[in-house]
Image: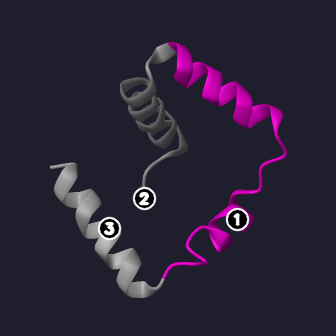
Amino acid sequence: MKTDTLIRNEGMEVLARTLGLVEAERFIMLIRKEQFDYTKWQENLFEDMSVEELSKKAAEFRKSSM
C-alpha cells in the first residue's frame, strides 16, 4: 500500500503534467473550497454505464496511455 505522501506526490505530478502547474494548483484550491464527498462521487461515477461499456472504455484508455 502506498503512503499518503507518495499518493499526494504522484497525484500532483499527474495534475501538473496534465493541466500545467498553475491549473493544477487552481484545481487543488477548487477541490478544497467545495464540500466534496469522494465516496458519494465514486458511487455514482459509472452509474449509467454497463459493465461492457466500462470495460471497453478502460481498454481504450489503457491503449491510449501506453
Assign the N terminus to one quadrant of the image.
bottom left
Nearer-N-terminus badge (2/3): 2
| Amino acid type indicated by mark 3 | Ala
**Disc 2/disc 3 C-alpha distance (Å):** 23 Å
Count of numbered marks: 3
Q: Name the residue under label 2.
A: 1
**Disc 3/disc 1 C-alpha distance (Å):** 20 Å
Q: Which of 7 and 14 lies nearest the eye of the viewer?
A: 14
Residue 39 x, y percent position in the rendering = 70, 65
For residue 39, which numbered disc appears in the image? 1
Vertical arrangement, residue 22 with respect to residue 54, above or below: above
Say whether residue 62 is left or right of residue 2. Answer: left
User: Callout 1 environment at 10 Å: few (<14), some (14 to 19), or many (20+)?
Assistant: few
Residue 42 x, y percent position in the rendering = 63, 66
Residue range of the region highlighted in magenta in the rendering? 22-49
Nearer-N-terminus badge (3/1): 1
Q: Which of 4 and 11 lies nearest the eye of the viewer?
A: 11
Q: Nearer the viewer, mark 2 or mark 1?
A: 1
Task: Tell whether label 1 touches label 2 (CB within 8 Å).
Answer: no
Element marked by disc 3: helix
Q: Is residue 32 magenta?
A: yes
Q: Residue at x 59, y 20 (%)?
A: 25
Q: Residue at x 48, y 46 (%)?
A: 3
**Disc 2/disc 1 C-alpha distance (Å):** 19 Å
For residue 58, which numbered disc appears in the image? 3
Element marked by disc 2: loop
